[in-house]
Amino acid sequence: MVGEGIVALNLVGFLCPVPMHETRKAIEEAASGTLFEVLCDDPETLHDIPALCDRMGIVLLGVSEDAGEYTFRIEKRR
């Protein structure tokens, strides 16, 4: 999915580097103002996704955890 709105990425079951690669690819293709909800279950993403946001200059709005699954809310502002 590309464009403004909310993009949901379900990356449960994938280990790094797949969640990082798929998240980066979706963000690069998206328009400014797009919100992302990225669902992962690889604990490495707790470090890797925030680092990706820093490198790309995008905003990590929040991270939540439920039963070993992590949801990252990200906004592409520019």
Image (spheres, rainbow, N blue to C red):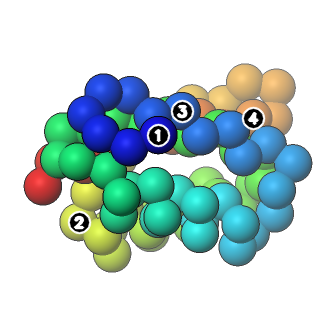
Q: CA distance from mark 1 to mark 3?
A: 8 Å
> Would residue 57 appear left or right of 11 to someone viewing this image?
left
Residue annotated with mark 2: 57
Specify the label residue 8 is tagged with: 3
Residue annotated with mark 4: 69
Q: Secondary structure at mark 4?
A: strand
Q: In this rendering, is residue 5 above or below 3? A: above
Specify the label residue 1 is tagged with: 1
Mark 1: few/some/many CA within 10 Å (<14, 14-19, 20+): few
Image quadrant for the C terminus?
bottom left
Q: In this rendering, is residue 20 above or below 12? A: below
Given contact means CB atoms under 8 Å apart, are the residues at marks 1 and 3 in contact? yes
Q: Dividing the picture into quarters, in which one does residue 39 lie?
A: top right
Q: Dividing the picture into quarters, in which one does residue 66 lie?
A: top right
Tell me which numbered mark, 1 or 3, is placed earlier along the sequence.
1
Specify the label residue 76 is tagged with: none
Foreground mark, 1 or 2, reads 1
The image shows residue 5 at horizontal and vertical percentages of: 30, 27
Nearest the eye: 53 or 47: 53
Given contact means CB atoms under 8 Å apart, are the residues at marks 2 and 4 in contact? no
Q: CA distance from mark 4 to mark 1?
A: 22 Å
Q: Which residue is farthest front?
A: 2
Tell me which numbered mark, 4 or 3, is placed earlier along the sequence.
3
Foreground mark, 4 or 3, reads 3
Tell me which numbered mark, 1 or 2, is placed earlier along the sequence.
1
Which residue type carries mark 4?
Glu
